[in-house]
Image (cartoon, grey):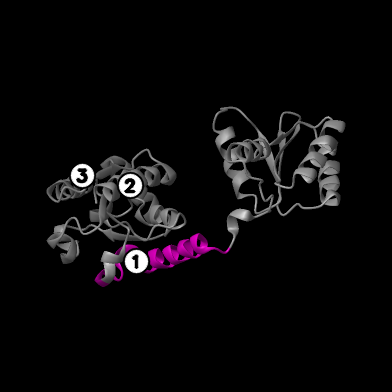
Amino acid sequence: MSNIYQIYLISDSTGETLDRIFTAIKAQFKNIDYKIHTYSFTRTENQILKILSNAKENRNSIILYSIVDSSLAKYLARNSEEKKIPCFGVLGDLILSFSKLLNQKASHQPSGQYTLNDEYYKRIEAIQFTMNHDDGNLVKDIKKSDIILLGVSRTSKTPTSIYLANKGYKISNIPLVNENSIPETLREDPNLTCIIGLSTEAERLADIRKNRMNSLKESQNKSYTDLSIIKKEVEDAKNTFKKYRWPIIDVTRKSVEETAASIIKIYEIYKNNG
């Protein structure tokens, strides 16, 4: 138990930023045993004292914090030092540096990234659009999409679409059974919008589909999980993408985030070439 690190993530907002930062940090270390303690909406000295009291009782406590109120952040850092608890701020120095570069005082407003502005409402609209256009639905207004994703079953179309929607992109995703399953609008105008094909290795796809069927406790559909059929399915999809000159992303060893980053890059090129 003494080798388990107690990671305290203290935020004055939702804690999403801290969670992502710690995820990036822990990915750099192969052997680390840890337990997460998350404290969101921490905005008073009293809250901080209670957290530090808990952290002091545990061995190997480490604090990461994201608090934009500079006086509260200093209070946390000072008290952590007194209790000899390692404590690291992830925003303070960056905000100060940007303040100097921009010659502008920071607002130090907690949850500032969640302000209900035009950008926020654009993101909500994108999420709603993407959910309505999942799995080949509402193809009649598909031209309103920023990006259209095509791919055979289980190539991460839906999770990738939702991730991109949360960044403000309107996404339609269409399951590719064969060329005829592509909406006629896209076949007639392959450059209608930014269209991207998602592909993967057949062996990996077969495993994913088998696991999917097992998790649903359904009887195996042989044509759905048969490797030889999947190989042809994947190859036919690639040929279709090439025929219409749509860029292809191999998602075999990519996380949703990595796939989304590649899609955004392609979309920016598409827009710039207009």
- Residue pointed to by mark 3: 231
- The amino acid type, in three-letter code, at marker 3 is Lys
Within 10 Å of disc 1 (Cα), the crowding (few <14, some 14-19, many 20+) is many
**In front: label 2 or label 3:** 2
Q: What residue is drawn where x is 65% and y is 33%? A: 33
Q: Could you tell me if the residues under marks 2 and 1 are in contact, i.e. CB atoms within 8 Å?
A: no
Q: Which residues are magenta?
A: 116-140
Q: Which residue is mark 2?
A: 268
Residue at screen point 41% across, 54% down:
164
Residue occupying the point 28% across, 40% down:
201
Distance between the alpha carbons at the discs numbered 1 and 3: 27 Å
Question: Is residue 5 a member of the stretch shown in magenta?
Answer: no
How far apart, in angstroms, are the residues tagged by discs 2 and 3?
31 Å
- Under circle 1, the secondary element is loop
Q: Nearer the viewer, residue 169 or 115?
A: 115
Labels 2 & 3 near each other (Cβ < 8 A): no
Q: Main secondary structure of the magenta part?
A: helix
Q: Residue furthest front?
A: 103
Amino acid found under the numbered disc labelled 1: His
Q: Is residue 5 left or right of residue 31?
A: right
Element type at mark 2: helix
Asked whether residue 151 is in view, the answer is: no
* Position of residue 192 in the picture relative to residue 51 (left or right): left
Closer to the camera in the image, 213 or 50: 50
